[in-house]
Image (spheres, rainbow, N blue to C red):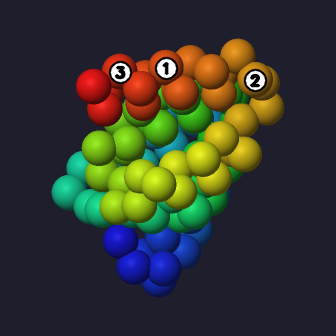
Amino acid sequence: MSPQDVSRLLQAVQRQSFDDNKLPILREALRESAVESEDLKRILSTLTFDRNRVELAKYAYPRVIDPQRFYQVYEAFDFQANVQELQRFVEGYNR
């Protein structure tokens, strides 16, 4: 996903008021895309609740083109418990 595509996606999502409306748009955009960790962090930051960020991060992880930089994504979370949940997911995925 190009930086321009990410910017357009962020603009489209910011028009939505609720995570429940944002998540389907984000999933659709990421379904057939490859994304950089830094861009995924920006995308996750558009969501209000950590639980939705975790859900989308798990969905997007297989599409991340720079998994060595995935640590940047953790900055999008408010609670350490959610970071730890995502870290466990990543560890399990990479086994």
Residue 66 vertical position relative to residue 54 in the rendered view, above or below: below
Q: At x 42% / y 52%, what residue is drawn?
A: 67
Horizontal and vertical percent position of residue 77: 71, 36
Residue 76 vertical position relative to residue 12 in the rendered view, above or below: above
Residue tagged by mark 1? 88
Separation of disc 2 and disc 1 at Cα? Answer: 12 Å
Mark 3 residue type: Gly
> Does label 2 or label 1 sit earlier along the sequence?
2
Crowd around label 1: few <14 · some 14–19 · many ≥20 (10 Å): few
Horizontal and vertical percent position of residue 21: 50, 38
* Furthest residue in direction bottom, as rendered: 4
Judged left or right of residue 9, residue 84 is: right
Residue tagged by mark 2? 80
Residue tagged by mark 3? 92
Figure quadrant of the C terminus: top left
Q: At x 47% / y 54%, what residue is drawn?
A: 68
> What's the mark number on residue 6?
none
**Mark 3 element type:** helix
Separation of disc 1 and disc 3 at Cα? Answer: 6 Å
Q: At x 35% / y 71%, what residue is drawn?
A: 1
* Furthest residue in direction front, as rendered: 95
